[in-house]
Amino acid sequence: MRCNTRIPSGCAISGLMCESGDRIDGSAIINSIALMHDRSNGLGGGFAAYGIYPRRSDQYAFHMMFDDLAAKENFDEYVKDHFIVEKDEIIPTRPFGNITNPPLLWRYFLNVDEKKLEFVEDREYVVNKVMEINSKVPGSFVSSSGKNMGAFKGVGYPEDIGHFYKLEEYKGYIWTSHGRFPTNTPGWWGGAHPFGLLDWSIVHNGEISSYGINKRYLEMFGYKLELRTDTEVVAYLFDLLVRRHNLPMEMAIKALSAPFWDSIDRMEPQVKELMTAIRMVYGGALLNGPYSIILGHSRGMMGLNDRIKLRPMTCGRKDDMLYMSSEESAIREIEPDLDIVWSPKAGEAVIGTLNGDVE
Amino acid sequence: MVMTIDAKGMYYRELNKMIRTAIEDGDTEFVLDNINGQRYIGDGIKAKARITINGTPGNNLGMFMNGPSIEVFANGQDGIANTMNSGEIIIHGMVGDVIGYGMRGGKLMIEGDVGYRVGIHMKEYKSQVPAIVAGGCAGDFYGEYMAGGVMILLGLGSGEDKPITGDYLGTGMHGGVIFLRGEVEDYQLGAEVAVFELDEKDVKLVTKHVKEWCGHFGHDVEEIMSGPFIKLKAISSRPYGNLYAY
């Protein structure tokens, strides 16, 4: 009796992490996001999973979408010129529900030849190549490019997308998910969430009203924003601030979700000076508009609301597990007996950190 | 006779249809077990009915509701009592954001904390005076654009790291009254409200609601009433009267 007509609603996000590094299969996250079916409208669903390729954990795993076989052949020539291809294979899928017209889905496990890294470090090299592929290699799209992680996304309801990609066959220590209700931008396979770059992935409910400012700011550092969506700026901002500028995660969050000036006025002198500096230096990175986001990366998961809480988020913990979701019921669906449950304050991040080694 | 529904895995439309049909057939008592995330429970029902909910109901619980009494033995989510007209909702737990949006009558009793924008656009007309009583603390924009009704926040569990309310308290408020069992800083107040002391009539009103709240959640009335309480009211009944005057 699920409704298949396109009814206006909000997006849904859900994420879970095992902070001790134990890995679980993808069925829990599918059940969680499926509970919020009515927040999506069938025009986009997706998942990010960390820890899924333990035997190739030192190689860049490129999840690719190709318009057609010709595009793939073209990319195969490109990738041979720029990377050492350790292995490539089709991403396994099964026909499912309303999932129609998928692109050709392929994954490549890549290393970078030392000779290419004379003047640039390898992650920077990979970022440059991802930007080049998405903007210059026709019919090819990189949906994720991190190590030991991957994005699985497309046009459809998220639970259908999850079954389509056989996520129950993967095991990860972080799973994030998104059910899309596109409002401002088209629903297309590459435009579904999560958005990824290196091991960063982002799922997002809301809109980034500051997109134009953030886009121009990022372009100064060589990022190309061509995915027809506001959400990609968030992934690139974390890449810029944390990877390239070496800001601690907490400071990067303060740049994106800066305190209001009148709150800064009431702060202790030292903190005031720091927050003023962050706002001055990183004005172009400030995210405005209604949003709740879940960021995934290889060492953790982070949930964040906009500064006046225009989108929902609830968090819960049970033993080593951290959960965050648009609705409490979506957490209880997979863990009814939570140790604690809370709604984080507007603009204050909830951070999950990998404590141990991944099994 | 009590109608018990095991709602495990049940889609909200099916559940709400069952309840509506049963009410049309004369049923008045419902126990909903294994609720998790089903939206719109009790919405638009115009009848005297008692609905007990075991589990976390989905968004917009009791929206446009006109008469029923709902008791939830779990936390609630967002949008509870949206534009509710009469009846009562009792929540044994905490709730999310935008609670009592445009609420125009009836009662909402919440054991714990409430989220952001509680009581936004709440209103009253003559004897139709809605009330929201919550035992814990609130997020920002408590009573935003409030035009009528009574909101009482008891602040249990508040402290150094957890103020009784967030900022923008009563922003745009132009009617109704807020009672807080605790202190707020001046900067937290919206421009349209001011803090007052409670008079005798206020104490009577607060006592009436607190007694009822304590009856549901088992607290001591005297201890709660020992306060101290403050009262928040709009300082102008028409703060935007001249906004478009020229």
Image (cartoon, coloured by chain):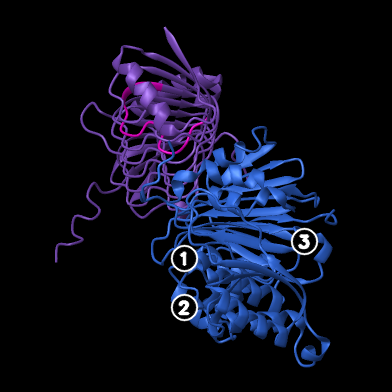
Chain colours: A blue, B purple
Q: Which mark is residue A213?
A: 2
Q: Quadrant of residue A241?
A: bottom right
The reply to whether the magenta stretch includes residue B66 is: yes
Give the magenta-colored segment's residue range: B56-69
Q: Residue furthest left?
A: B246
Identify the residue position indicated by label 3 in the image. Answer: A53
Q: Residue furthest top?
A: B1
| Residue at 53% in and 82% down | A138
Q: Is residue A2 above or below residue B44?
A: below
Q: Residues within 10 Å of mark 2 (few under 14, many from 20)?
A: some
Is tag 1's residue or tag 3's residue first in the polypeptide sequence? 3
Question: In terms of depth relative to the viewer, which is nearer, B159 or A2?
Answer: A2
Magenta: main secondary structure: loop
Give percent across and percent down for residue A256: 56, 68
Q: Is residue A219 above or below residue A351?
A: below
**Type of amino acid at the residue the image marks with label 1:** Trp
Is tag 2's residue or tag 1's residue first in the polypeptide sequence? 1
**Type of amino acid at the residue the image marks with label 3:** Tyr
Q: Are marks 2 and 1 in contact (CB under 8 Å)?
A: no
Q: Viewer-nearest of labels 3 and 2? A: 3
Task: Please tell me whether mark 3 sits on a helix, a strand or a loop.
Answer: loop
Q: Which mark is residue A188?
A: 1
For disc 1, the chain is: A
